[in-house]
Image (cartoon, grey):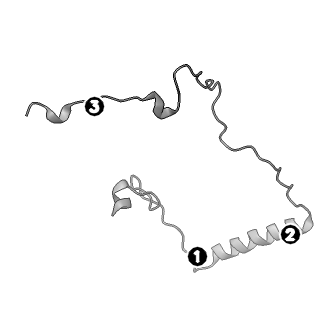
Amino acid sequence: MAGCGRRRRMMNFNVDAVSINRGDSLPPSMQQPTPLFPVMEHKPLPLAGGEEVEYLLALKQEFRGAMRSLPFFIQPAAPHRGQRSQNTHSCVSLYL
């Protein structure tokens, strides 16, 4: 048992595998990072405004407030200090 499992594997690099032949020029280096989001082809339409939209928004907020005040609304339990929330998963629970 002279360290058979501790050998480091030599990295093989084949230039032909990356489709670069001898004498070809390398692609230009990137001077800036790639954009986070793709370029938008069409600009979004402006939000619709007016009295009707404001009335519907106020009605929605009032309805949600009324629903929260009902006795059937269940408040989410606050997690105890040091306890993980239910939305996070450990690696072990993902595979079980």
Q: x and y percent of residue 68 in the render?
A: 64, 73
Crowding around mark 3 (Cα neighbors within 10 Å: few <14, some 14 to 19, many 20+) is few
Identify the disc placed on residue 60. Answer: none
Q: Are marks 3 and 2 in contact (CB under 8 Å)?
A: no
Q: CA distance from mark 3 to mark 2?
A: 69 Å
In the displayed structure, would residue 55 be above or below residue 84? Answer: below
Q: Amino acid at mark 2?
A: Tyr
**Residue at 9% of width from left, 30% of height from top?**
2
Which quadrant is the N terminus positioned in? Answer: top left
Circle nearer the viewer, 2 or 1:
2
Which quadrant is the C terminus positioned in? Answer: bottom left
**Residue at 30% of width from left, 28% of height from top?**
10
Identify the disc placed on residue 9. Answer: 3
Crowding around mark 1 (Cα neighbors within 10 Å: few <14, some 14 to 19, many 20+) is few
Q: CA distance from mark 1 to mark 3?
A: 61 Å
Q: SS class of the residue under badge 2?
A: helix
Q: Amino acid at mark 1?
A: Phe
Query: Which of these two is toward me, 56 or 17?
Result: 17
Q: SS class of the residue under badge 3?
A: loop
First in sequence: mark 1 or mark 3?
3
Q: Horizontal placement of 67 versus 52: left or right?
A: left
Q: CA distance from mark 2 to mark 1?
A: 25 Å
In the displayed structure, would residue 80 be above or below residue 59? Answer: above
Q: Horizontal placement of 83 versus 35: left or right?
A: left
Task: Quickly name the residue at label 2.
Answer: 55
Circle nearer the viewer, 3 or 2:
3
**Residue at 82% of width from left, 53% of height from top?**
44
* Count of marks overlaid on the render: 3
Q: SS class of the residue under badge 1?
A: loop
Circle nearer the viewer, 1 or 3:
3
Crowding around mark 2 (Cα neighbors within 10 Å: few <14, some 14 to 19, many 20+) is few
Task: Quickly name the residue at label 1.
Answer: 73
